[in-house]
Amino acid sequence: KGDYTVGNKKSRIAVVTLASHIDPSPEAALWGSSKTENLGVEKIITNIISNSNIRYVLVCGAESRGHLAGNSLLAIHANGIDEKGRIISSEGAIPFIENISREAVRRFQQQVVLIDRIGLVSSREILKLVNKYKNKGEAYPCDPMVVCTQKKRQSAFSNPVSGDAIISEEFVMDTTAGVIYQTESL
């Protein structure tokens, strides 16, 4: 599931347009947007590693404010995730990966090269890059990796916490101050 279009499945390039809507090219294997640093990044990884032909990911378009999906995608590719699933060096608001394995993240890191053009919104320039990379190199030498994600059950907090907005079991937010706190630190 997600906001993407499948193009030429043999193409070596996928395009992530972040928070921008840019009409897709049928020359790209996948073309879609991503506005979040967690589920959006998970969906990108899952869809990319399911096609061994994809060797390049063009990250373009306008960054999503606060969430920084592009920054998080670059960070997970460069640094991976820590033992709690946090994307190392991400500047996004809630950069936690919960639905895919470290193995899937490693496969993404090994399979593709990211082309960082965050901020590029010119369809003409994006299409030039797609045409440059669509036939470049060979397919990844391993079979496609299929990731089955399972929705986690929402669990209630067992201990009272302060903050007026619950973000997850681990985080709450003081919306007046705009500060996110880890629940165990309260």
Image: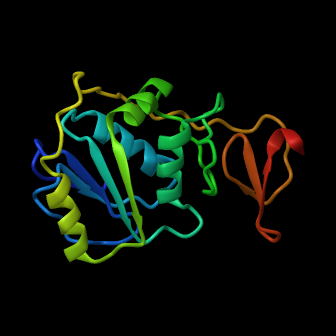
Relative to residue 185, is residue 94 depicted above or below? below
Q: Position of residue 135 (x, y in %)?
A: 12, 47
Q: Position of residue 176 (x, y in %)?
A: 81, 71
Q: Nearer the viewer, residue 66 or 70?
A: 70
Relative to residue 125, is residue 88 depicted above or below? above
Please give the name of the residue rendered at 10% of the width and 41% of the height, measured from the top-left corner. Answer: 10
Q: Quadrant of residue 50?
A: top left
Q: Residue reaching furthest right?
A: 186
Please give the name of the residue rendered at 28% of the width and 57% of the height, measured from the top-left corner. Answer: 15
- Residue 84 seen from this side: yes
Please give the name of the residue rendered at 54% of the width and 33% of the height, measured from the top-left corner. Answer: 153
Q: Quadrant of residue 83?
A: top right
Is 121 on the left-hand or right-hand side of 93?
Answer: left
Please give the name of the residue rendered at 14% of the width and 60% of the height, measured from the top-left corner. Answer: 131
Q: Nearer the viewer, residue 88 or 85?
A: 88
Is 170 on the left-hand or right-hand side of 41?
Answer: right
Q: Quadrant of residue 138?
A: top left
Relative to residue 59, is residue 95 depicted above or below? above
Q: How many marks?
A: 0
Is 172 on the left-hand or right-hand side of 110?
Answer: right
Q: Position of residue 142 (x, y in %)?
A: 24, 22
Q: Nearer the viewer, residue 76 or 4?
A: 76
Quadrant of the snapshot with the C terminus: top right
- Residue 150 seen from this side: no
Q: How is the image coloured?
A: rainbow
